[in-house]
């Protein structure tokens, strides 16, 4: 018999971790179906689905660097020299290639690299911390079906003459 406190703890965990809970329930259901109900035809179909999924996961995704050819050329140069600071519209990036590799390793669909850079900056501006930050891809975006994260540092500098902040992201 399960205690009431155990039931409450489980319910609280499921509420706080809905993606993980959904994943674990789906995994348990699929195992149960295979063990207890699957016919030979079902197993053949599942094998084909697994092969197709493995092919999709092994195919490298393509991220469009930029629709602007000048910016695309600058990004490619930044990838060739990852430790050299790269200035994009007043925001400085160091090792932008690490962010690109994180995306290509984890995203399940092709996409727009600059959209993720913009997303990183937009999400990060909500934080007032100076040091360690995290960018997270949601479970629905990743090959693994789990959230994936990359850690980076952000430093800000206030220019009193121009009266504006500049930001430096280091991966």
Image (cartoon, rainbow, N blue to C red):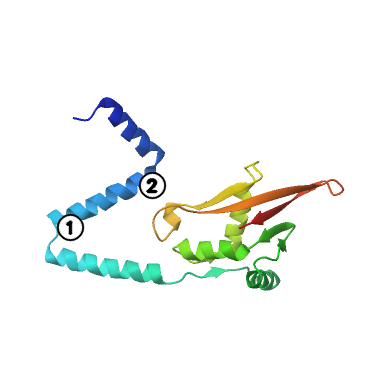
Answer with the quarter of the image where residue 116 lies. Answer: bottom right
First along the sequence among labels 1 and 2: 2
From what the image shows, is residue 10 above or below residue 145?
above
- Taking depth in this image into account, of 45 and 32 the one nearest to the observer is 32
Under circle 1, the secondary element is helix
Residue of label 2: 19
Measuring from the top left, give residue 86's x and y in whole percent.
Answer: 70, 64
Measuring from the top left, give residue 79's x and y in whole percent.
Answer: 63, 70
Measuring from the top left, give residue 117's x and y in whole percent.
Answer: 61, 58
From what the image shows, is residue 14 above or below residue 113?
above
What residue is shown at x 71% (from left), y 58% (from top)? 92
In this orientation, does residue 107 appear?
no
Answer with the quarter of the image where residue 51 lies. Answer: bottom left
Measuring from the top left, give residue 18's x and y in whole percent.
Answer: 38, 43
State which quarter of the image contains the N terminus.
top left
In the drawing, what numbered circle is on residue 34? 1
Answer with the quarter of the image where residue 93 lies. Answer: bottom right
**Label 1, label 2: how many angstroms apart (C-alpha)?**
23 Å
What residue is shown at x 45% (from left), y 57% (from top)? 141
From what the image shows, is residue 26 above or below residue 38?
above
Under circle 2, the secondary element is helix
What residue is shown at x 62% (from left), y 50% (from top)? 122
What residue is shown at x 44% (from left), y 63% (from top)? 108
40 left or right of 66 in image: left
86 left or right of 48 in image: right
Q: Are marks 1 and 2 in contact (CB under 8 Å)?
A: no
- Taking depth in this image into account, of 98 and 46 the one nearest to the observer is 98
| Mark 2 residue crowding within 10 angstroms, few (<14) / some (14–19) / many (20+) | some
| Mark 1 residue crowding within 10 angstroms, few (<14) / some (14–19) / many (20+) | few
54 left or right of 117 in image: left
State which quarter of the image contains the C terminus.
bottom right
In this orientation, does residue 116 appear?
yes
């Amino acid at each position: 018999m399960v205690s009431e406190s155990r039931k409450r703890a489980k319910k609280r965990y499921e509420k706080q971790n809905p993606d993980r809970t959904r994943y674990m329930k789906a995994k348990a259901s699929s195992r149960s179906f295979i063990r207890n109900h699957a016919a030979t035809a079902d197993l053949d179909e599942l094998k084909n689905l697994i092969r197709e999924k493995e092919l999709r996961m092994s195919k490298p995704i393509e991220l469009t660097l930029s629709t602007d050819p000048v910016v695309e050329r600058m990004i490619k140069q930044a990838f060739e020299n990852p430790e050299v600071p790269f200035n994009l519209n007043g925001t400085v990036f160091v090792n932008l290639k690490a962010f690109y590799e994180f995306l290509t390793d984890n995203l399940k669909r092709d996409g727009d690299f600059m959209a993720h850079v913009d997303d990183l900056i937009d999400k990060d501006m909500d934080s007032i911390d100076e040091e360690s930050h995290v960018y997270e891809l949601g479970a629905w975006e990743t090959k693994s079906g789990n959230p994936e994260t990359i850690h980076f540092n952000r430093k800000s500098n206030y220019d009193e003459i121009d009266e504006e902040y500049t930001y430096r992201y280091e991966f």
